[in-house]
Amino acid sequence: MSNTAERRLDYVAIRRYEARMELRLTNTLTRRKEPFVPADPKRVTMYVCGPTVYAHAHIGNARPPVVFDVLFRLLRHKYGADAVIYARNYTDIEDKIIAAANVAGVPIEAITRKFEAIYEEDMGALGVLEPTLKPRATEHVADMIAIIEALIAKGAAYRVASGVYFSVAADADYGKLSGRAQDELQAGARVDGEDDKRHPSDFALWKAAQPNEPAWDAPFGRGRPGWHIECSAMIEKEMGSPIDIHGGGIDLIFPHHENEIAQSETAHGHGLARVWMHNGFLTMDREKMSKSIGNIITPRELLDQGWQGEAIRWALLSAHYRAPLDWSEDLLKQAQASLDRLYGAALRLKDVEASTAEPPAAFLDALADDLNTPAAVAELSALVTAANNAKKPAEQAKAKGELLAAARLLGVLQNDPQAWFRASFSPQVAAAIDALVDERVAARAAKNWAEADRIRDALAEKGVEVMDGPRGSTWRRKG
Ligand code: AMP
Ligand code: ZN
């Protein structure tokens, strides 16, 4: 059979497999793991609540963008890169931002633009792909006003002195996402400055203008939006509801997502999202990582300590997204060791040309099972073993292709293997290792085997293994 015909068969097999690969996702709304069927496979839509940009994100905040980045990659693989529209917003108007701007004596944009840039840099370091859309709340105020007007017209929202509120009593379904019964909600939390709302569970759609706060004109009075209406408006404007998937951290189920549902569905008369997905908490010593508790570590701090972004990412994917994940230095060390093993295999096969760009079925099945990253990581490990054991060129070419393709879906192993190992030493130490390896190459060329062995042993003592190949010598850190 000709090469082209073979490749054609390969292609057909892949398409057939993809048609079969059933993606199953746990839907918070139905409390079940169910097959994922997009409304339109040519236009799959996903929205994930993004950061409130007033401070550095911590690694707990990084869990949702990393987890949903893997889902984004899987959806693109299944439906095609151009068929997936993924929006991750910036909450750039909110109480904490206003407070930070007032403390610093600057306009809110000075705070929000700075922390947006830092966030993008951090996400880049963690290997997070650019979402298709990155809407800002401040650029959608007119869309928020339109929804609020529709709610007032329907009698589901009312205006009082402190602002405009959504009337929870107007929504018979209220509580369906979080499973809270209406009478449980009767108690409701008291919020400062909201004494004039009619019911404790009613929530602010619009907050009346205050001195020292940014404000926009609206038919129902000058003011600024509440947090929940921001996401409803961005989803509607950017993608149109219902969207296929809406995600975020588990703490957003109530009240944020419950309120998004209430206001959007009441205004539009149809569902907001078909599948709701929530990641579990990142904890430290079993306690939720959060700014208010003060037990936070930022990606920036870890990068400054010399950890590589890819190791942080791997650590974040080491638990199933719905389970809690307890952060520790040990977790990072294990991540680093696993990636060393992956890059070691890639380095060994660096001169081999990959013969496929398709991950094996077992790996895809693991990921398609509600994004089971621990199972996917185990499959990846098996691929490393296969790559290390492959002897024949054709086996090596296939093993390398499968390993790289699978790793790409997890967002790892896409860098130069030598650069990976160099980056775990200081530039000075890496340069000294290079020099020793060069000396050894020269000793071997001069057939000075004793000197070559002496240098190899000296490097081994530093934890460095020299790998001699047909096209020269490279090195890696020993596990
Ligand atoms: P925030 O900037 O506080 O609005 O949070 C941004 C995202 O991070 C939200 O989706 C939160 O649910 C999520 N998040 C916050 N803390 C944690 C944590 N400790 N573990 C996992 N996700 C978190
Ligand atoms: Zn949101």
Image (cartoon, rainbow, N blue to C red):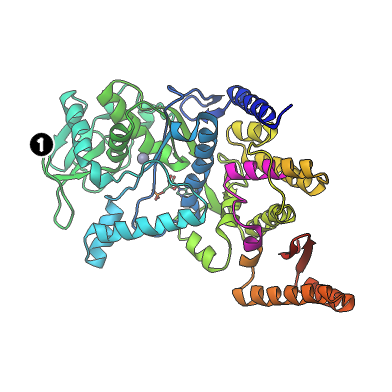
| Residue 82, horizontal then vertical, whole percent | 44, 34
User: Where does the image place residue 261, in percent across and percent down from the top left?
Assistant: 34, 30
Q: Is 430 left, or right, of 171 in this rendering?
A: right
Residue at screen point 63% across, 41% down: 405
Taking the image as four quarters, which one is ligand 2 found in?
A: top left
Highlighted magenta segment, given as a residue range: 400-420
Q: Which residue is at the front of the view, 53 or 28?
A: 53
Location of mark 1 (residue)? 219
Mark 1 Cα within 10 Å, few/some/many (few <14, many 20+)?
Answer: few
- Farthest-out residue, right: 450
* Residue pictured at 29% horizontal, 43% vertical: 227
| Picture residue at 62% right of the left edge, 37% below the top | 372
- For residue 352, side relative to residue 252 (left or right): right
Q: Main secondary structure of the magenta part?
A: helix
In the displayed structure, 238 sits above or below 333; it is above
Along the line of sight, the residue nearer the viewer: 8 or 396: 8
Q: Is residue 106 above or below residue 410?
A: below
Q: Is residue 16 visible?
A: yes
Q: Which quarter of the figure is the C terminus placed in?
A: bottom right
Most foreground residue, 3 or 250: 3
Give the quarter of the image for residue 457. Answer: bottom right
- Residue 253 is situated, as x and y percent measured from the top left of the image, at 42, 37
Q: Please name the amino acid that badge 1 sits on.
A: Pro
Q: Determine the image quadrant of residue 475.
A: bottom right
Residue 309 falls left or right of residue 479: left
x, y percent for residue 477: 72, 65
Q: Which quarter of the rendering shows the N terminus? A: top right
Tell me which residue sits at (56%, 41%) in the image. Answer: 321
Task: Describe the element under mark 1 as helix, strand or loop.
Answer: loop
